[in-house]
């Protein structure tokens, strides 16, 4: 008997330690918990939060009442020496009706604002700027077209970091190129599936400029846990500048420079099979790389050096505190080790080739 009690105690403590350790993900220090869904920083996340807390407290009240009644009954009516067996009864219609009606009323009360919110969160403001979000194994792609100040037929294509104007609604139109993914920016809204051949809608808005962490929230293969993203909210004027920069083609490096060597490596080593770079002139036969892109593409590298594109490789690099260039070296030397199952292969690049690639990539702002 004693060993059994000890076993139960140890198991209980272990479970407690395990659940408390999970709290680090919702630590009060916001910097340590970028995916904290209890810390809304925009109107849509706040709408969910405003629904969550009343439901949470109602559930807590029910829990305390029910568990309390069970504990009281177990203590006061327990079997004791000399106690007679209580009178056996079966059922009590009045009580049963009461404890069916009360939960039904509570659920009905919760359902009204919940259903209202579900509809409100699924329909974008028709005035909102649209951004297409495309899921890939294992990174997010963003396409902007038809936004204010953008010439007809032009498109901006970028990856990992979604740049948006702060304080304005952005209507994300979600879809997937391969399997089902899920785009989740906890501080800006709830989760939404990305489904191949279908479009789903996610309203996003950040109160203030800042970097908002995002993560794929649906198991989508080997490197699902390495499929992250950033939403970078910037003031309107800076967003307009960003759009203007994104519409510029990549600069063609001058002959004989390390950047020119880098571009040569890009073309010769096979990077060009998946990645696009849009140049002004097509004479380098690079932006004609549309054949590979029909059914499969890697992130566009045209503006890889952009000031907001601070992460790469599905936004898992650079790691916290790691130098961008060091991380890029590590990535180019052996992508499959960093991202198991990655479509980016180990191309067997030499150190010199990697250095020139980086020199070139950094010029593409
Ligand atoms: Cu994409 Cu998990």
Image (spheres, rainbow, N blue to C red):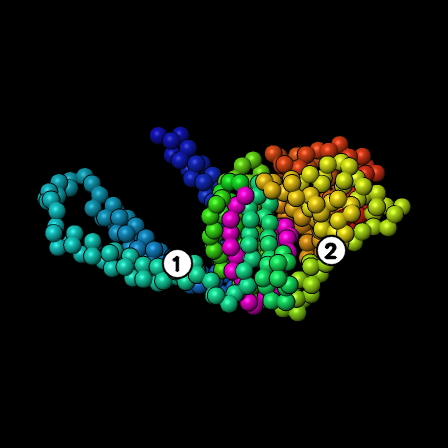
Q: Which residue is mark 1?
A: 118
| Residue 26 sits inside the magenta stretch | no
Measured as percent of width and height from the top left, residue 232 is found at: 62, 59
- Give, as a single range, the part of the protein colored magenta: 156-177
* Circles 1 and 2 in contact, beta carbons < 8 Å: no
For the residues marked 1 and 2, what is the alpha-carbon distance in whole angstroms? Answer: 41 Å
How far across and down, in percent of the image, does residue 117 sit? Answer: 39, 61
SS for dot 2 = loop
Residue shown at the point (63%, 56%) measured from the top left? 155
| Ligand 1 within 8 angstroms of badge 2 C-beta | no
Q: Is residue 354 above or below residue 101?
A: above
- To which residue does mark 2 refer? 249
Q: Secondary structure at mark 1?
A: helix
Taking the image as shown, residue 330 lies to the left or right of residue 42, namely right
Q: Whole-percent x and y of residue 215?
A: 55, 48
| Magenta span dominant secondary structure | strand
- Work out whether mark 1 precedes mark 2 in sequence or the reverse, and give the earlier one: 1
Classed neighbour count for the residue bearing mark 2: other residues with Cα under 10 Å, few (<14), some (14–19), many (≥20): some
Question: What number is the disc on residue 302?
Answer: none
Would you say residue 145 is visible in this rendering?
yes
Pick the quarter of the image with the N terminus: top left
- Please give the name of the residue rendered at 29% of the width and 57% of the height, measured from the top-left corner: 107
Task: Confirm whether the magenta stretch covers residue 176.
Answer: yes
- Tag 1: Cα neighbours inside 10 Å, few (<14), some, or many (≥20)? few
Name the residue furthest front: 283
């Amino acid at each position: 008997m004693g060993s059994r009690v000890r076993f139960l105690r140890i198991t209980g403590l272990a479970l407690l330690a395990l659940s408390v350790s999970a709290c680090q993900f919702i630590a009060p220090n916001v910097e340590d918990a970028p995916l904290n869904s209890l810390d809304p920083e925009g109107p849509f996340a706040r709408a969910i939060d405003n629904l969550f807390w009343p439901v949470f407290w109602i559930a807590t009240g029910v829990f305390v009442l029910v568990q309390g009644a069970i504990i009281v009954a177990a203590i006061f009516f327990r079997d004791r020496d000399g106690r007679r067996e209580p009178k056996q009864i079966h059922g009590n219609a009045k009580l049963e009706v009461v404890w069916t009606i009360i939960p039904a009323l509570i659920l009905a009360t919760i359902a009204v604002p919940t259903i209202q919110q579900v509809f409100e969160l699924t329909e974008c403001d028709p005035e909102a700027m649209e951004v297409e979000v495309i899921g890939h194994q294992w990174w997010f792609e963003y396409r902007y077209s038809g936004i204010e100040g953008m010439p007809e037929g032009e498109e901006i294509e970028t990856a990992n970091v979604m740049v948006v104007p702060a304080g304005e609604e952005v209507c994300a139109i979600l879809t997937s190129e391969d399997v089902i993914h899920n785009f989740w920016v906890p501080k800006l809204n709830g989760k939404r599936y990305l489904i191949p051949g279908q479009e789903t809608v996610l309203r996003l808005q950040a109160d203030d400029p800042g970097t908002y962490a995002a993560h794929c929230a649906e198991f989508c293969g080997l490197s699902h846990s390495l499929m992250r993203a950033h939403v970078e909210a910037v003031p309107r004027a800076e967003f307009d500048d960003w759009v203007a920069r994104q519409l510029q083609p990549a600069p063609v490096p001058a002959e004989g420079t390390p950047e020119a060597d880098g571009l040569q490596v890009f073309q010769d080593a096979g990077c060009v099979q998946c990645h696009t770079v849009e140049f002004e002139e097509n004479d380098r036969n690079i932006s004609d790389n549309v054949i590979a892109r029909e059914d499969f593409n890697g992130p566009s590298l045209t503006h890889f050096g952009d000031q907001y594109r601070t992460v790469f490789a599905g936004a898992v690099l650079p790691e916290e505190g790691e130098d961008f260039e060091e991380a890029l070296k590590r990535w180019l030397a052996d992508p499959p080790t960093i991202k198991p199952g990655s479509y980016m292969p180990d191309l067997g690049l030499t150190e010199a080739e990697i250095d020139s690639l980086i020199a070139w990539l950094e010029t593409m702002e």
